[in-house]
Amino acid sequence: MSIRILVLALSMCQATSLFAKTNGDIVKNSPFTPEKFTFQAWSEEDAAVKMKSSEKKRKPANSSMIDDSMMSKELKAIQTRLHGIKTSEAMEAFLDELDKNYESYPTDVKFYITQVMPTKAFRGFFYRLKPLFDGKSNFVHSQILTTAKAMATRVKVFLPYEHAEAGYEYVSSPFLDAKGEMVEGFKEEADVQLWVVNELLPLINTATQRLEKLSLVEPIVWDQKMVFGSQSFADGINRFKLIGEFEKNLALSASYSAITSIATMRAYSVQKTVALYKEIGFLYGFDGFGLFNRIDGVSAEKISKVIRKPAFASTGTLMPDGAKWMDYAYKASQKSLKRLSMAWELSSSERKDENLYAFNTNYISVNRDEIEENLRILNRVVMSKETETLRSAVTGEVVQFNYSKLFTNPPKDLKVFLPTQFDKNAKASREVTLANGTKKTLTYRNYLEGSATGWDVKQYEAYFPSIKANDDVYRTVRVLNHIQGNWLAIR
């Protein structure tokens, strides 16, 4: 389960109660406290030394030289206990014990704990989501339900083991809270926002801080049986994988990326987003077309009109303490990129026995020059506090972008970036010459009807100084999209 994808999906969150939580309630119940959200300092030089030392430890010549004798007895015991878990209650007790005794465990167990502990926040997640969507938006409800059913099917087909079924029960079924009462579901978007900050974020922060302190210069061994059960990998092929400093840096990069997403979500109001998605779903036919609606396609104009309705005036607005959270997100995004770059710079084709490790860098060495260039550009943009110029290798066009200002001077309302002008021509036409020499005008649908043609460019200029006119918006989108994929790159 990808934490980042789930966190981003949480933005699909409608207040239904007469006593719905306000933005002030959110600030009061999930305050930003600097001492709680200060990142642990770390030395890039120290990380580099660890990575270099880690490469020297990559000695096994083939997978037959890795076996469970390289695992600690504690990790073996935990694996055996995990495979015996049959209920969500047993899973909760298992996770609690790991967390409580963290400091007493050897390195391989500690690494395992850092990767699984955030799961605790997702206990009963699908059950808790139901009140938020049920009967309010067929569009969103169907998406969430489809995801839950697909996960259940995958577990049944690919992981037909009691501990895996207990794991799915853990994230999908109701449970009793600390007071011995049935856990409450999310009734409004604010409940999800509070859950993300008060339940999920602390677990990710703790896992990240713990992982920062771990040294994997001496690689640890991962046993694939941990996931697939005691009867799996009977012939031993590909059963074991090594995890070293390179893999640790990738895991840290992902953790900081998740923190970035959470902090950004907390910075802005998600009030009435379920109602918003319901109306957008209505445009697409997910929640019905309506008695007098005709199938006419969904345009930027239609979507913009929905988002700009007075009912959604507060949706997407900066929270009273949003600037603090955006600054936190900014720092987390930089740390994520630093850890990714650290891993990349020290992953070379000279590393030995890559096929024995959890991440085989030989797969990315094929496109090394291209990835190197894209990472260089990302570092220039993300780490700089100044405006940077980016050039498309495809069209030669250039744009200016100040990444830092999105976080240090965040927009007060995300709706200001919506288009303000649209193509109003319902029909298009062209003249053709028939075989007999006569001319005829052909009239047909204008497929650009409703597309964006104008924006409030002043709102863009603070972050993209090169945007001075409407055409510059399209140019900016075009250039920024050229960084996507393997055959396009910004130079």
Image (spheres, helix red, strand yellow):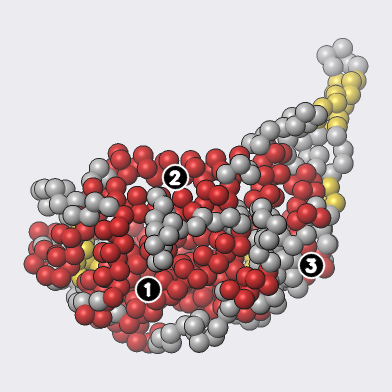
Name the residue located 35 percent from the left edge and 67 percent from the top edge. Answer: 117
Quarter containing the C terminus: bottom right
Q: Is 140 placed left or right of 69 in the picture?
A: right
Instruction: Indicate the amino acid at tag 3.
Output: Gln
Q: Nearer the viewer, residue 207 or 71?
A: 207
Q: Residue furthest top?
A: 436
Q: Nearer the viewer, residue 179 or 100?
A: 179
Q: Earlier in the sequence, mark 2 or mark 1?
A: 2
Residue 110, image x, y percentages: 26, 74
Instruction: For label 3, count other residues whose C-alpha is less than 10 Å away and answer few (under 14), some (14-19) or many (20+).
Output: some
Q: Tell me the tag on residue 207.
A: 1
Instruction: Indicate the amino acid at tag 1.
Output: Ala
Instruction: For label 1, count other residues whose C-alpha is less than 10 Å away and answer few (under 14), some (14-19) or many (20+).
Output: many
Q: Tell me the tag on residue 100.
A: none
Name the residue located 78 percent from the left edge and 54 percent from the top edge. Answer: 311
Q: Earlier in the sequence, mark 3 or mark 1?
A: 1
Mark in the foreground, 2 or 1 = 2
411 up-or-down from 8: above or below = below
Residue 39, image x, y percentages: 47, 83
Q: Nearer the viewer, residue 192 or 433?
A: 192
Q: Is 424 placed left or right of 203 in the picture?
A: right
> How far is mark 2 from mark 1, CA to CA?
26 Å
Residue 332, image x, y percentages: 51, 75
Tell me how many marks there are: 3
Q: Which residue is mark 2?
A: 148
Q: Are marks 3 and 1 in contact (CB under 8 Å)?
A: no
> How far is mark 2 from mark 3, CA to CA?
39 Å
- Quarter of the figure with residue 59: bottom left
- Quarter of the figure with residue 413: bottom right
Helix, strand or loop under label 2:
helix
Q: Which residue is mark 3?
A: 459
